[in-house]
Amino acid sequence: MTIQNVVVAGGGVLGSQIAYQTALKNFHVTLYDISDESITRSKKRVDSLFPDYQADTGLTEEKFAAGLKNLNFSTNLANAVQNADLVIEAIPEKLEIKQAFYQQLSKVAPDKTIFASNSSTLTPSMMVKDVDRPAKFVNLHFANRIWLFNTAEIMGTPQTAPDTIETLTKFARAIGMVPIILKKEQPGYVLNSLLVPFEIAALKLWATGIADASTIDKDWIISTGAKMGPMATMDIIGLRTPYYVGLEYLKTHDDPVSKLTMQKMKEMIDAGHSGKDDGQGFYHYPNPEYLDPNFLK
């Protein structure tokens, strides 16, 4: 199967990046979201990608604009997917929301369409019962700033057809990604199995008052030679997704430190300080303190 028409469902931080990167590589892309307000935010996120693309890849304004011409927006799911070869779901990290979406999507998508979830933590087996085509259902996970950290983790269920994996592997390469194919299901894939415990440890240091965000990042950067600390990384990811994941964890774990961490994260989110996308998280944007030449002194 050849993929040419792609729908990205959800125009959040990663959804907007996936949609634009795919459009930049000359695929026909429709970004679907649930309301006009959501679409307006999605368009702003896409437009705001240009400075980072330019800085990181040397992309010219002309080429960025050419990518935009391949990208459309829609609030009507049936219309958006009517000729879709692939739907990449990037909606909020809540199982019940994703399940409801796939039930709806199954009713309106053509038989040819492959479904792929960008879920950070949920395995495809947790959602496969809600699709009408288990052989064409897979998880396809991207790292944030996908033009720079260009991995695409591919994880199927025992029901996923080998040709679905092969098709998505070719698609990932076509949009500039390095395919990372998992041999079996793993919550968090490879990347988040490593990243999430790291971020949790940093957040708990911050929430319990052991060190502030900049101190945590300074220590990590100086001590390891990393380009960025965990709190700056959290700003780029955005606090909402890890917050939702943390709430799921608290449903089955009575952990006072995790409760405190979730409470402090909620206070930031409620104040509109959920990360780079909001202009403020642990740092202030567009000129975060960790980029100051004196930050590590």
Image (tube, rainbow, N blue to C red):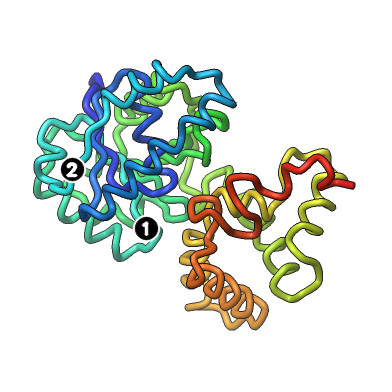
Q: Nearer the viewer, residue 17 or 204?
A: 17
Left of 139 or right of it: where is 32?
left
* Mark 2 nearby-residue class (10 Å; few <14, some 14–19, many ≥20): some
For the image, the number of numbered tags is 2
**Residue 136 x/y as whole percent:** 25, 37
Q: In this view, does 195 lie to the left or right of 33?
A: right
Q: Which of disc 2 and disc 1 is earlier in sequence?
A: 2
- Label 1 – label 2 distance at C-alpha: 18 Å
- Residue 254 or residue 37, whichever sits in front: 37
User: Looking at the image, can residue 180 be seen?
Assistant: no
Q: Residue 106 at x, y = what percent?
A: 15, 48
User: In front of the other: label 1 or label 2?
Assistant: 2
Q: Residue at x 43, y 44 (%)?
A: 14
Q: Is residue 217 left or right of residue 233?
A: right
* Front one among 109 and 54: 54
Q: How crowded is mark 1: few (under 14 residues within 10 Å), some or many (20 or more)?
A: some
**What's the amino acid at mark 2?**
Ser
Q: Is 167 placed above or below 252 here? A: above
Residue 92, which numbered label?
A: 1
> For the point 57% across and 57% down, which residue is it?
280
Residue 36 in the image, given as x and y percentages of width and height? 21, 52
- Find numbered disc 2 in the image and state the secondary structure of the residue it sits on: strand
Depicted 242 relative to depicted 181: above or below = below
Report the amino acid beneath label 1: Pro
In the picture, the quarter occupied by the N terminus is top left
Residue on which the image places disc 2: 74
4 or 207: nearer the viewer: 207
